[in-house]
Structures are given as structure tokens and as C-alpha cells.
Image: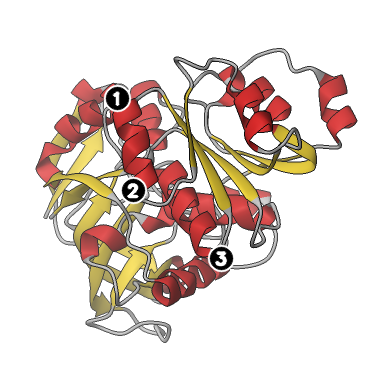
Amino acid sequence: MKRLQVDGGFGLEHLKLVELPEPEPGHGEIRLKMTAASLNYRDLATIQYGGHRLPLVPLSDGCGLVEAVGPGVTRVAVGDRVITQFFQGWHSGAPTAEGLATALGGSLDGCLSEKLVLNQEGVTKAPASLSDVEAACLPCAGLTAWRGLQDGGLRSGDVVVVQGTGGVSIFALQFAKAAGATVIATSSSDAKLERAKALGADHLINYKTTPDWAKAVRKLTGGVGADNVIEVGGAGTLVQSLNAVRVGGHIAVIGILAGISQDVPVPLIFSKNARIGGISVGSREMTEAMCRAIEANGIKPVVDKVLPFTDAVAALELMKGQSHFGKIALSF
């Protein structure tokens, strides 16, 4: 079988194609024939900057067919179409240090392989309404957006701010609209904002032409502010998010696209009674709830480009350029 792995150092130049024997599943394990995978910014950062042992097979998000099972497997059967779980050891309940130490494409080898052996507990049946490529977009970006909104207590009539038009933000837009919320989308591209509008975004803010976008959010909400902010920028946007959220509102801190460290005005946090939650994907139980909602509401992940898995470096370069809208996927 073929797989791509990072070896000899970190950086895209160290992502190499290798040939290995086909793995056999052990007790409680299954072997997947991978059909699709998708990229997240986390994958690019992991490959470029490291922090994990080498060699490493990257990527957390994939869809595949169960082609072999080991003894004791009862959750799935040969022929089932499944998606991978980002945290292999987080099945339900609150996050734990042990569960968060089982991330695919990080502490564990990931999905950039033609064949993949996982524990039966580490997969979820793919929504029947989605293609393999669409289903492969769910494990990280989809679930992160889902949990971010659920942790914020999303209700019909809420106002949700989504930053940018990457995978998490577009999923959050779709989930929020399905729940009956009003969505304010930000981007540096008017063309991308128009695409967000076509997906249901109610208000659009270009943060290049309107750098104080929090002020624009408050104006759009009659001075009240947003109920939920999907914060993917990190240090560079957190203060704006604090200014944009309503008193008692929720900020789901998800990404670091605009930086990892900055002074935070602590009085603004307590004066707003703001609830700030760090979101690190979610559990299998959350994945199952998300998949039910996707099928019930006819939600289709937005896929910008699909490349062969052997062209993963080119796909990662596309992600690095940030020109995509929604997800970049790979086919096997």
C-alpha cells in the first residue's frame, strides 16, 4: 500500500510517498480502504512546524470502507462506510487529558494512507446523504463548528458571527442557518462574501475595508452584539470578538490564523460577562449528533477542490495560500 509520511524533518518538502505492507487488524480493530480525506489548517501547521514524533502520517479527516475486521468487532461490519474520529479515545462525555492525547495525524498516525487500521471505537458511520469526499470533511472542521455552536447554547433567533470562509466557518454558517439563527460573515474578499451570502449569510463585513468589524456587528444588532462568535483568528481577532459579542454571549475559540499570542483586555471579559470556550474538536457522541442533524437538514459540506491523495503537497500549498472557500479534499 502507499502512504504519505513526514520523515527526516518537518516541512512540506519532507512529506514523502512510501510503499509498505498492508496492515492486518488485531482484536477490536478494523482495516479501512480509504476513499477520501480532507485538509485542515492544523494539518499544515503539524507538517510545517512539528511537535510530534517522526515519521508521522498526517491528516485526521477521512472516509473509507471497512474491508476487514479483527476478532471482537461488533460496532461495524465489512462493507460499512465510515468516517474517522479526530480523537480516537474520546467517545463521550467531557474531554480528558487521556482522550485528547489520541489525535489522528498528531499523536497517532493519520489518514494519508491507502489502508488504515483503527480501533472499532474510532469511527462513525458516514451520513448516507453525503458522498465520500463530503463525508471526509466532517471529522475536524464539521465537528469543531458543531461543538462551538452547541457549547454556546445556539437557539433559533440567535445572532452568530463567523470569521472568514474556511472549513469551520462555512460549517458554522450552515449549522447556524439550519437552527434558525442570523449569521454575520466576515472576510477580506467581497467575492467570498457573496458566496457566503448564497449559502445563507444574512450580513456581510469585509474586514479589510471595515477593520473595526466589531463596531459593524454592534450596529447590525442594534447595539446589543452577537450571541455567538466563531473565533478562528486567534490573537489577532480575539479583542474584536470580545467587542462584538453581547453581554453574556459566547466566543468559541478555535483557531490561530491571525496569531497565537496577544495582550487581552481582562476587564472587557468580566464587564461583558463573556463566556469564552476553547474548542478542540469533540467526541464520537458529538459526531453522531452532528451527522443526524446533517441528514435531517440536508446539509452538504462545501468542497472547493479535490485532488488525488498523491498530490497532497499541492493541496497543502493551496491551503497555505488561503484562496479556498470551504474545504480542500483528497481522493484515493
Q: Which type of secondary structure does the marked residue at label 2 adopt?
A: helix
Alpha-carbon span between mark 2 and mark 3: 28 Å
246 and 251: which is toward the camera: 246
Q: Which type of secondary structure does the marked residue at label 1 adopt?
A: helix
Disc on res. 198: 2
Where does the image place residue 110, in percent across and percent down from the top left?
33, 49
Residue at x 14%, y 46% (from the top left corner): 309
State if disc 3 and disc 2 touch (CB < 8 Å): no
Q: Which type of secondary structure does the marked residue at label 3 adopt?
A: helix
Residue at x 60%, y 17% (from the top left corner): 212
- Quarter holding the N terminus? bottom left
Amino acid identity at mark 1: Lys
How packed is label 1: few (under 14 Cα within 10 Å), some, or many (20 or more)?
few
Question: In this orientation, does residue 103 appear?
Answer: no
- Return the residue at label 3: 286
Alpha-carbon span between mark 1 and mark 2: 25 Å
How packed is label 2: few (under 14 Cα within 10 Å), some, or many (20 or more)?
few
Rendered view: 161 above or below 269? below
Residue at x 39%, y 57% (from the top left corner): 138
174 and 306: which is toward the camera: 174
Alpha-carbon span between mark 3 and mark 1: 29 Å
Disc on res. 88: none
Where does the image place residue 259, in percent across and percent down from the top left?
53, 18
Amino acid identity at mark 3: Met
Pick whichever of labels 3 and 1 is earlier in the sequence.
Answer: 3
Horizontal side of 159 relative to 146 (left or right) equals: right
> In front of the other: label 1 or label 2?
2
